[in-house]
Image (cartoon, rainbow, N blue to C red):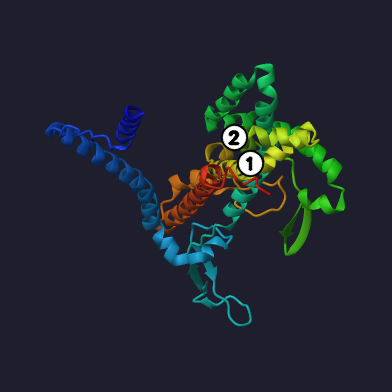
């Protein structure tokens, strides 16, 4: 008995005693040099990425400062975009033109710039793109996650959707210019005008008030094809694969217990899909924000199909212009300093807006609350 107690005590003592620490051999000079080099290389790479973000904003702000100083925040609410000086006759209190030595006395009005029409065009075309793309994207993501694995097509279908994102924007623009725009002009828009143009609360979509000789005339918009509607559809097709891919990843991360629990409580297949969308709503909203950032910054495709008319017309059948298309059309011809500065002011607004969209989308997709947003 005493021998057993001694063995037990000895085993307990050995088990409770701390093990001797293992001493690593001291690092050689070469190892310390390599570790230090890698550490500073990683720090330099992080600083370079941060510098790549700061430099464009700084350069645009410096180059756009003359326009920022001249127009200030009024640049965002002004609708006049005139790059040339105007020679205006001077009038007296009675409204008569003042003459001197038989010639009219004139004054020079400097160029004036305002970004409201292009802000409006960017916002409306992006909203039209989202209206078209979001339902199809969510439906495609649900199909890939819930249905496609059962029929062995999830992989090929995901590849095809991601392949759409790799198509150059110029190809989308050419397709919109030579296929979609003529189809809208000859088939879709005339049908819309003939059917919905007579509906009182929808007539604003097909008519425009124009001032002719001091009188306001209500004129029907022509079915041109190259308008806001065409631009919104092309943008919608371009952002569809982005929203679909991110939405698919968000829905894949919905816990299976969430789906099975809803089915066990008597939910139909469609109701369980709605529950999946509700659970991942933060990530899905982030996917929409990513698509919105892409739509707002797209240049070549929208420039080719939107009509490029610097105006504010409520109808989606009217030509318009976005910030990106304005830069593409006028930057090469901007010889005046203030004109170029105003264009860079627009570019600065577009850059900051896209940056904010991406920050919000990044936070919603991979942020700390994106996986728990479905809690009710």
Q: How many marks?
A: 2
Say whether residue 236 is visible: yes
Residue at 66% of width from left, 42% of height from top?
279
Q: Residue 334, position in %: x, y?
A: 44, 50
**Marks 1/2: CA–CA distance:** 8 Å
- For residue 148, which quarter of the picture? top right
Q: Residues within 10 Å of mark 2 (few under 14, many from 20)?
A: few
How dense is the environment of label 1, judged by Cα within 10 Å: few (below 14), some, or many (20 and up)? many
Residue displayed at 56% across by 25% down: 163
Disc 1 vs disc 2: Cβ atoms closer than 8 Å? yes
The residue under the point 63% across, 48% down is 320
The image quadrant that residue 125 belongs to is top right
Q: Which residue is mark 1?
A: 280
Q: Is residue 138 above or below residue 363?
A: above
Q: Position of residue 248 (x, y in %)?
A: 61, 32
First-in-chain label (1 vs 2): 2
Where 31 falls versus 124 (above or below)? above
Report if residue 181 is visible in the image. no
In front here: 43 or 193?
43
Q: Viewed as shown, does residue 154 lie left or right of 13?
A: right
Q: List x then y, in percent, for residue 24.
A: 20, 33
Check disc 2 and report its element: helix, strand or loop: loop
Please give the residue where the numbered disc 2 appears in the rendered image.
253
Q: Residue furthest bottom?
A: 93
Residue 264: image location, x then y, percent: 77, 34
The disc placed on residue 316 is none
Q: Residue at x 68, y 40 (%)?
A: 277
Q: Nearer the viewer, residue 110 or 87?
A: 110
User: Which quadrant would the N terminus be assigned to in this image?
Assistant: top left
Eyeballing the image, is 17 above or below 343?
Answer: above
288 sits to left or right of 216: left
């Amino acid at each position: 008995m005493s021998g057993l107690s001694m063995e037990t005590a000895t085993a307990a003592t050995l088990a409770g005693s701390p093990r001797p620490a293992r001493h690593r051999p001291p690092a050689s000079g070469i190892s310390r040099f390599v570790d230090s080099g890698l550490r500073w290389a990683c720090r330099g790479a992080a600083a370079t990425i941060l510098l790549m973000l700061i430099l464009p904003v700084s350069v645009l702000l410096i180059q756009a400062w003359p326009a920022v100083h001249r127009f200030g925040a009024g640049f965002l609410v002004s609708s006049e975009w005139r790059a040339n000086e105007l020679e205006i006759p001077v009038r007296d209190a009675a409204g008569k033109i003042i003459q001197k030595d038989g010639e009219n006395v004139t004054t020079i009005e400097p160029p004036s710039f305002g970004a409201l029409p292009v802000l409006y065009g960017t916002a409306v075309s992006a909203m039209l793109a989202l209206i078209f793309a979001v339902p199809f994207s969510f439906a495609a993501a649900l199909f890939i996650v819930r249905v496609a694995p059962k029929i062995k097509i999830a992989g090929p279908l995901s590849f095809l959707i991601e392949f759409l994102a790799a198509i150059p924007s110029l190809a989308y623009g050419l397709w919109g210019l030579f296929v979609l725009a003529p189809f809208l002009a000859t088939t879709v828009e005339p049908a819309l005008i003939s059917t919905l143009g007579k509906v009182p609360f929808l007539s604003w979509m097909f008519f425009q008030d124009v001032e002719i000789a001091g009188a306001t005339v209500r004129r029907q918009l022509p079915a041109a094809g190259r308008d806001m509607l065409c631009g919104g559809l092309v943008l919608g097709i371009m952002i569809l694969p982005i929203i679909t891919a991110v939405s698919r990843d968000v829905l894949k991360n919905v816990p299976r217990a969430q789906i099975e629990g809803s089915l066990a409580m008597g939910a139909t297949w469609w109701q369980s899909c709605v529950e999946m969308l509700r659970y991942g709503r933060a990530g899905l909203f982030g996917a929409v924000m990513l698509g919105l950032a892409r739509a707002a910054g797209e240049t070549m495709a929208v420039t080719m199909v939107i009509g490029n008319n610097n105006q504010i017309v409520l109808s989606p059948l009217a030509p318009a212009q976005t910030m990106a298309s304005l830069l593409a059309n006028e930057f090469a011809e901007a010889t005046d300093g203030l004109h170029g500065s105003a264009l860079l002011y627009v570019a600065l607004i577009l850059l900051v807006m896209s940056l904010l969209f991406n920050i919000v989308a990044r936070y919603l997709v991979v942020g700390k609350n994106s996986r728990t947003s479905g809690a009710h």
